[in-house]
Structure formats: structure tokens, C-alpha cells
Amino acid sequence: MALKVDIKSAAGKVTGSIDLPAATFDVQTNVPLIHQVVVAQLAAARAGTAKTKNRGEVSGTGKKPFAQKGTGRARQGSVRAPLQRHGGVSHGPVPRSYDQRTPKKMIAAALKGVLSDRQRNERIYVIDSITAAPSTKAAIAAVRQFSDRKNVLVVLSRAEDISWRSLRNAEDMHLLVPDQLNAYDILKSDDLVFTQAAINDFLAGPVKGKGATAVARESELEATA
């Protein structure tokens, strides 16, 4: 299968094409590896803050509530025991980290595997520009020309602020920038739509040196805006 994808305009006309590198979009899909990376990503998203009080942490006296014998009741040594009302919890959850060690090479291999799978099934599309003016209706129509499936992942360049604002409230569409692309979000989505600027940024790779610092500061400003 050719690794050439047509670039279409928002009106649906072919304006050009782009060659996708086989090293990223035509590799063997390693399902166990992808599963391990996705499980690690979901595990890392867990807060791990669940906590219950044991019998040593709940309030209450340590005095024996009633006599050992003669009452006909089961013997009890403390009102803080798990069997008592408002007593401590036995074997309850405690704060912990669910992080799993996942080397960067594994994460990169999983991403290439899911991208290759989507490319082999012709589920990757490229659009030159989504919208020139803020319009949710026009932006959705431009993306939906490629697919009517439920979930669509749209990858936008950081500079495409108008398209981002037009699509951020669209249902069944998830937005990412190229350096946030990951195996889990691709697997969740039925189709993957890149803008031309976003696919160029993704193929160029992460920014290094002083440019990386500038991009990081820009991301912080966007997050606080």
C-alpha cells in the first residue's frame, strides 16, 4: 500500500499530497506492546489517593465495651474494632502510586504501531486548513467530510488557535497537538485527521535546544490563559 495521503481543503478538493515515512506509518503492529503501554498510561492517570482509617486512627476509647462473659454476646475488646459501628476499616485502601515503568522506546514503538494500523486501514486524513474564521459549524463540516464514524481525533498545530477554538466544544471530537499524540487516544478514535501544519510538525519531531524552551513557555501561558 502506498504511503501517500491526499491533502484536501475544507471544501473537499484535493490540493496536494504528502508522503508518510514508512518507518513511522508502515511498521509491524505489536499488540502486546501496545497493550502494555496503554495499561501503563491509564494506570499513571489514577490519583491513588483513596484512604480509609484503620482501628488505630478512628476516634474512640480503648476500654472494653462490656464484660467478656455473662452477656450472651460475642466478646469485644474495643469500640474501634472493624465489627463495631464507626470502627476502623480492616485492609482498606491507602495512598499509593500506580505508575509503571515504561521506557521511551516502548512508548514510541506503540505510537508507530497504532499509526501504522490506522494507515493500513486508510483511517488517516490530512486537511490543509480547517477554518479561517471562528465557526464551529464550518469546522465540524470540514472534519466530517472524511468520516461519519463516531469518534474522531483531530491533530492541530499549536499555531492554529482559530481551529482549536472552533472545535474545542464539538462532540465526539478529541483535539491534540502533535507532541501530545499517543497510542491510547488513537486507539479510542475511529479516524485520525491531521492538519497540514500538524503533520509537518509531527514528522519534523520534537523541538530541541532553545526552541524547546520557548515552546514549553508558550504551553504554560496557554494553560494559564
Image: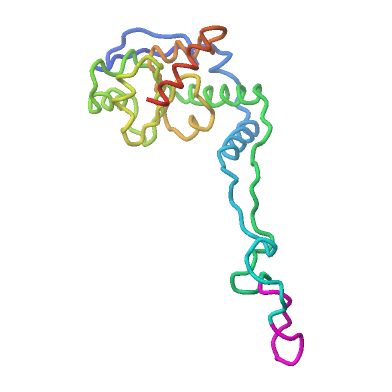
Residue that sits furthest to the right in the current view: 69
Q: Nearer the viewer, residue 210 or 166?
A: 210
Q: Residue at x 62, y 66 (%)?
A: 59
Q: Position of residue 70 (x, y in %)?
A: 74, 92
- Nearer-the-camera pick, 49 or 204: 49
Identified at 65% across, 65% down, the residue is 88
Q: Is residue 67 magenta?
A: yes
Relative to 173, say whether 92 is above or below: below
Mostly what secondary structure, the magenta segment? loop
- Point out residue 163 in the picture as x, y percentages from the top left corner: 31, 21
Asked if residue 132 lies left or right of residue 59, the reply is left
Picture quadrant of residue 84 = bottom right
**192 in relation to 216, above or below:** below
Question: Which corner quadrant of the image does residue 29 belong to?
Answer: top right
Give the image quarter of residue 159.
top left
The structure's colour scheme is rainbow
Residue 176 lies, in percent from the top left, at 43, 25
Q: Is residue 157 left or right of residue 26?
A: left
Q: How many marks?
A: 0
Q: Quadrant of the C terminus?
A: top left
* x, y percent for residue 17: 39, 9
Q: Which residues are magenta?
A: 66-79
Q: Is residue 220 left or right of residue 15?
A: right
Say whether residue 22 is left or right of residue 173: right
Which residue is at a point 64% across and 70% down the rendered structure image? 60
Q: Is residue 53 magenta?
A: no
Identify the residue shown where x is 71% and y is 76%.
63
